[in-house]
Image (cartoon, rainbow, N blue to C red):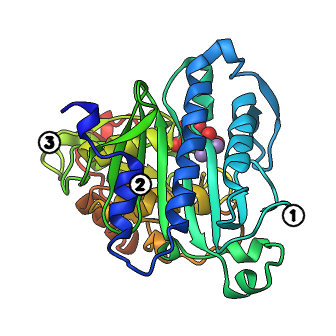
Amino acid sequence: MLANHRSTLTQYLIEQRRRYPQASGELNGLILDVAIACKAIAGTVALGELGGNARSLEVNVQGEVQKALDVLANEVFMRRCEWSGQLAGMASEEMEAPHQIPDAYPRGKYLLVFDPLDGSSNIDVNLTVGSIFSILRAPADVIESGRDVTEADFLQPGAAQVAAGYALYGPSTMFMLTVGNGVAGFTLDPAVGEFMLTHPDVHVPEETREFAINASNSRFWEPPVKRYVDECLAGATGPRGKDFNMRWIASMVAEAHRILMRGGVFLYPRDTKDLAKAGRLRLLYETNPIGWLIEQAGGRVSTGRQPMLGVRPTALHQRIGCVFGSRAEVERIERYHHEPTPEVPVSPLFAERSLFR
Ligand code: AHG
Ligand code: MN
Ligand code: MN
């Protein structure tokens, strides 16, 4: 189909809004601002070394080395989204405290939370990165008073999100979105400068033979995770009775995209590596938005122990164990967390040959 026969993101949003005659269009305006920010970031990402993207700067609030592009992407999000009067405040991976809407602009009823660049360790090597965002309603007293936002205003469960999505800066730039009515995917047409609807109704296949986990952490895994991975590795001769394939991009947004497109399961579970951290990924701007997209596409997201979207956050930069993807696999992993792990290895043959023992 020719690009000019496809719906644009704007058209899709207007059509979605028609389902709610009382809607003001403010949410649409905000999503379009986020999309413009993502187009700008896509342009800079594409410059690669020419843009000095991989330069390392300081250590950020997460204790991780910031790249020049992390900071630039954060700036782009703030400047593109703060002016329009839709937002009461913003928060991001790259800022310790929430960003207040400057006095020069009106304040609105939404909160924007984002990871301006996910997978940024991949910038140096020209691999896929992305931006993740989540939109929440500001608490009523914030909207009424127009007061500055505090960390507490953002501590809402994933189930309270009104929109979530991500942009993927891969071989093509994509924008994946949910407003609570399934998942739609758009591909940037560089000739037109617009996101075109290319994936109108995304579904995560229920069954899979593909899993993704950072296996270098295996000695820190909890027994249910070890059991699950061992069973996958045992393949056709193990209890699963089928061979599995493994992937690890170290860019969660790219793994999530692969899983949305063809199924699979992703694990960054809670482990014993650093007991001060409950997991690697961040709840508010990584696992909640990605998790909601996955669930809107028929998949499942969990901490391993409980549904992710029900977790009541306790801190803006809270980390959490995360498992998402094809429903049957995530349910199996949850079950393993709730039942005692069998003492006996998966299979005597496999026990000797296991990569991870
Ligand atoms: P960010 O670049 O925003 O800090 O996030 C990186 C995250 C996530 O994208 C990825 O899955 C994970 O870190 C990679 O972790 P490892 O370095 O342990 O592979
Ligand atoms: Mn990230
Ligand atoms: Mn990031």
Find residue 337 and report its image quarter. Answer: bottom left
Which image quarter is the N terminus in? top left
Mark 2 or 1, closer to the camera: 1
* Residue that carries the numbered disc 3 in the rendered image: 237
User: Of all residues shown, which one is farthest toward the right?
Assistant: 103
Q: Position of residue 245 (x, y in %)?
A: 26, 35
Label 1: few (<14), some (14–19) or many (≥20) C-alpha neighbours in 10 Å: few
Q: Residue at x 68, y 53 (%)?
A: 274
User: Does the image show residue 32?
Assistant: yes
Residue at the top extreme? Answer: 50
Q: Earlier in the sequence, mark 3 or mark 2?
A: 2
Mark 1 is on which residue type? Asp
**CA gap, disc 3 to disc 2?**
40 Å
Q: Quadrant of residue 84?
A: bottom right
Ligand 2 quarter of the rendering: top right
206 relative position to 118: left or right: left
Q: Earlier in the sequence, mark 1 or mark 3?
A: 1
> How much space separates mark 1 and mark 3, taking CA atoms?
65 Å
Provide the secondary structure element on which disc 2 rests. strand
| Residue at the spot of label 1 | 103
Asked whether 84 or 301 is in front, the reply is 84
Q: Nearer the viewer, mark 1 or mark 3?
A: 1
What is the spatial separation of the Cα atoms under label 2 and label 1, in whole angstroms?
A: 30 Å
State which tag comes first along the sequence, 2 or 1.
1
SS assignment at label 3:
helix
Q: What is the number of the mark on residue 177?
A: 2
Which residue appears at 38% of the width and 79% of the height? 21
Mark 3: amino acid: Thr
Within 10 Å of the Cα at label 2, are there few (<14), some (14-19), or many (20+) other Cα atoms?
Answer: many
* Residue 83 x/y as whole percent: 73, 56
